[in-house]
Amino acid sequence: MKNQSLLLTGLLIMVFQFTIAQGSPDYTGGLKFKFNEEGTKYLRLISWAQVQANYIADDTFDSNGNENSQLNFNLRRARILMFAQINKDFLILTHFGLNSLTSANLSPTGKGDGSQLFFHDVWAQYSLGKDHTIGGGLHYFNGISRLNNQSTLNLMTLDNNRQAWATIGLSDQFARHLGVFLKGKFNKLQYRVAINDASVSSLDARAAVAGGDAVYNGRSSLGSKAAGKTYAGYFDYNFLDQESNFLPYKVGTYLGEKKIFNVGAGFFLHPKGSVIDTGTAINPNIEGEDVAIFAADAFYDAPLGENGSALTAYAMYQNSNYGKNYLYSAYGTGSMLYYHVGYVLNGDKLKTRFQPYVSYGIHSYDAVDDNRSTLGVGINAYMSGHNSKLTLEYTNQSFGAIDSNTITLQAMIYL
């Protein structure tokens, strides 16, 4: 415990030493190539990187008895996003990069799976009048909740709540589905709905066992006719300032630059997405189980007075049905309650600003009596808003025999 306290103190000192002396250079919208004087025809580029130092406060050992280092480094995200519009009636977006590059998945010549770039998003869209758009491709117009549509550019917490990205690797490719979407707004009500193909491959590669629990591989087990489509939607009412829905990525915190209060609800449906075996070991009988996930949430972000302080608060309830007693990795049939709150300390907006925060989630499962709880306590140091940010967070996760404690320092820059 003494070593943990010393490390935490050292990391805090690093944060303050590296941030107090920094200014806040002007940021005028990043790299944008204008093809006409009005700027309505353009190509916009965004690049960002998140680099982490992770200290696992619990001793871990290899199976051969060799002790692992408790301090490790992680290239959490390295991404490039670009979108172009040469006519207000249509747009194309491309987003590629890699995630979580560590010493465990580095390769000697950079040709291993962990080192490879891949497409996160590629879609084309067409305007249907002023307020509505239709499009298709590999897209991020997800349902369920705000967190399931979260941007990684402006997170308030170190990372997204893992259980809220409720379909990653089960029916999609890294939270993106291949399909068509419709998005827009009716006055203060924004919406996004989508019909997608379910992925044939799934992280859940288990085989259904006679009399056992559900497994999520209905598309590969039953075929595309029975289990090939997923349906998703999210709707949020903007009571105060109106958020942009130009892109699908939901903002984590505005640092008081807007006054936002939204209430939303969403869903994800995958008919026969999971399967169970109702037969015997000798005579198996595979049957489909519908996957249905619903959530409701509320988001508030507003300045407090004129001194630069601001409050960000979010709460979400999610009910997940992946099939009979489903439990795999971060996913499980059951319910979840999650919230986070952050406070931007008062100060000059042109200088480094600090935002302490706390997050907590609790997830109950039908398959087991234990609940999964996740606590995060952290502080953000904004040297130039989200464009240059340091985050220090302590995380505790408790579930069954697991009780893990991690301290992470993350540096992020996006341009």
Image (cartoon, grey):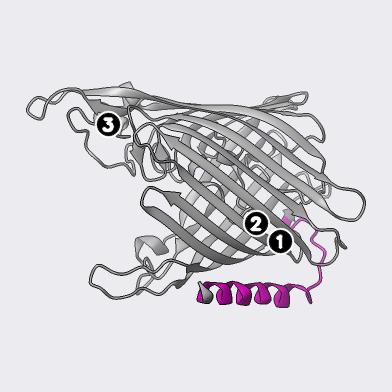
**Disc 3 crowd, CA 10 A, few/some/many (<14, 14-19, 20+):** some
Confirm whether residue 360 shows in the render: yes
Which residue sits at x=25%, y=27%?
276
Decide which of tag 2 and tag 1 comes sooner along the chain.
2
Decide which of tag 1 and tag 3 comes sooner along the chain.
3
Q: Mark 2 points at which residue?
A: 46
Q: Mark 1 points at which residue?
A: 387
Kindly report the distance in space between the C-alpha atoms of the residues bearing marks 1 and 3: 45 Å
Which residue sits at x=53%, y=44%?
122
Q: Mark 3 points at which residue?
A: 213
Q: Which of marks 1 and 3 is in front?
A: 3
Res 141 quadrant in image? top right
Q: Which of 177 and 302 is in front in this view?
A: 302
Kindly report the distance in space between the C-alpha atoms of the residues bearing marks 2 and 1: 11 Å
Marks 1/3 in contact by CB < 8 Å: the verdict is no
Q: Which of marks 3 and 2 is in front?
A: 3
Determine whether, in the image, residue 409 is placed left or right of residue 398. Answer: right
Determine whether, in the image, residue 326 is placed left or right of residue 262. Answer: left
Label 3 residue SS: loop
Decide which of tag 3 and tag 2 comes sooner along the chain.
2
Which residue sits at x=66%, y=47%?
84
Q: Quadrant of the C terminus?
A: bottom right
Q: Residue 262 at x, y = what percent?
A: 73, 32
